[in-house]
DNA sequence: AGCTTAGGTGTACGCCGTAAGCCTGTCAAC
DNA sequence: GTTGACAGGCTTACGGCGTACACCTAAGCT
């Protein structure tokens, strides 16, 4: 189909997903509706269905698009360094689109898109390079993956008081105000430290704990 | 208000939240609408607004209700045992309502309900008993909490092929079918092990890694 | 020239959250 | 005992949602 006198780019699955990503980043996940995404493209809602199955398919596309930003290192000689890199990269792509974690959380089926699976393949490959195989590899993957996903989820959600991103931490004093002071003394005591903590350092802290645990459990041979 | 001739229980926030929980467990999160919950109670949608602020408030109530199932141990003498207990309990309450993890993931503000905060208070208290204080306590909490949340999220989502719950694992052969075989060899190799793995054992595996890491980092005094 | 088809549009249906107002039964104040 | 406030139900209505279905147009074939 040639471009009409309006000189409008033709739609495509990628363009639709990109537009949805923009809407999600700018206005939140609940703003991602067929009509809103279509408007973003100067088009009617029903036109999107020529390029995606349905809304679920669009959300799957969002997950894949986010994962496609994952960068792979050239040097993979040291597996712990590679694992560190992968973990940080995973967190980076998730935090680049803070609302996408809700989409992942809402999924009830395995991914099949090869773009979305690339990072997982890379992670398993790295685990294999560490000499961790079979059942142990799955253990290692789920432990690391769970940690990363959960950490980001708590981080972007400011779920238990500690947030990050560009939105500042909630003021500890204000949060404490909203709490029944005598019932949750340990939380109150922790609040100021939540505000002052560097989330990157926290993430690294747990990451090193897990990596060290994996190393002592499985040795540290490289390939 | 006395009970009318229809002998219907009066509504209350707790009854509304309970009904919503039932709907969510039976029909999924997207079925939790004002009208559906009202129908569950034999009532009209607008009646709910006399007991909850709005839908967001209802979802907050779901989170609190789930956390209220958290059981606390009597014996807290050994802090690692207590931490293990708390982690397992946290996972248990989340898995008892597999869709609630999406609600948590969608939250963008700290919790203030004391019922929902009880487990967090308990966790921080336990961490304190381990002699971990201040900034370190926040680190430990976020690391453990992130791990638990993320593990459950991946577990109930069957996100990367490995699921659990009563729904059986996806057949590894069938999943492999849907994959571009040559592009993701490590995933293909891991699939059968995902199917055969015990998720409880996986969870414990990572949990022990983290606990051991915390112990070596901070010593193991008890209180 | 005529056919197929890809890719856009418009209309319509049954959901959704919720604002606004109404109706009735309870209960405290008089 | 009457009255007035009000708690807690109900009804209606509005705008937005996902999407089924029918339609239109123009490109690319034979």
Image (spheres, coloured by chain):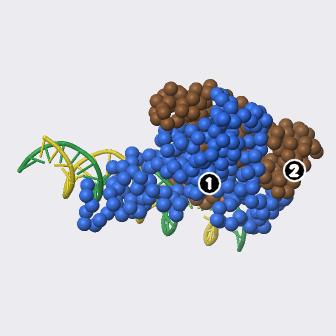
Chain colours: A blue, B brown, C green, D yellow
Relative height, residue B36 to residue B112 (above, below): above
Using the image as rendered, state which of residue B45 and residue A20 is in the foreground: A20
Q: Cα distance, mark 2 to mark 1?
A: 29 Å
Residue drawn at 64 percent across, 34 percent down? A128
Residue drawn at 69 percent across, 36 percent down? A222
Question: Does residue A47 appear left or right of residue B221 in this picture?
Answer: left
Residue density around tag 1, few if under 14, some if 14–19, many if 20 or more, within 10 Å: some
Residue drawn at 61 percent across, 37 percent down? A124
Residue B210 pos. (x, y %): 78, 41
Callout 2: residue from which chain?
A: B
Q: Secondary structure at mark 1?
A: helix
Residue A80 pos. (x, y %): 70, 42
Residue A35 pos. (x, y %): 40, 59
Dots 2, 1 in contact, CB < 8 A: no
Mark 1, residue position:
A92
Residue density around tag 2, few if under 14, some if 14–19, many if 20 or more, within 10 Å: many
Mark 2, residue position:
B132
């Amino acid at each position: 189909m040639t471009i009409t006198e309006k000189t409008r780019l033709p739609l495509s699955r990628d363009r639709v997903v990109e537009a949805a990503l923009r809407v999600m980043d700018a206005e939140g996940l609940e703003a991602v509706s067929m009509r809103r995404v279509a408007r973003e493209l100067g088009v009617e809602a029903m036109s999107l269905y020529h390029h995606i199955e349905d809304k679920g398919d669009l959300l799957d596309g969002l997950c894949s698009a986010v994962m496609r930003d994952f960068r792979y290192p050239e040097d993979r000689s040291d597996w712990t360094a590679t694992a560190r890199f992968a973990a940080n990269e995973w967190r980076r792509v998730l935090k680049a689109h803070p609302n996408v974690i809700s989409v992942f959380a809402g999924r009830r089926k395995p991914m099949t898109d090869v773009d979305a699976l690339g990072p997982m393949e890379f992670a398993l490959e790295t685990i294999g390079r560490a000499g961790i195989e079979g059942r142990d590899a799955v253990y290692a993957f789920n432990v690391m993956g769970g940690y990363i996903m959960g950490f980001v989820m708590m981080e972007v959600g400011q779920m238990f008081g500690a947030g990050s991103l560009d939105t500042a931490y909630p003021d500890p004093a204000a949060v404490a105000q909203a709490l029944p002071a005598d019932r949750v003394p340990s939380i109150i005591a922790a609040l100021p430290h939540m505000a002052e903590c560097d989330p990157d350092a926290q993430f690294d802290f747990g990451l090193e704990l897990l990596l060290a645990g994996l190393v002592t459990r499985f040795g540290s041979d490289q390939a």
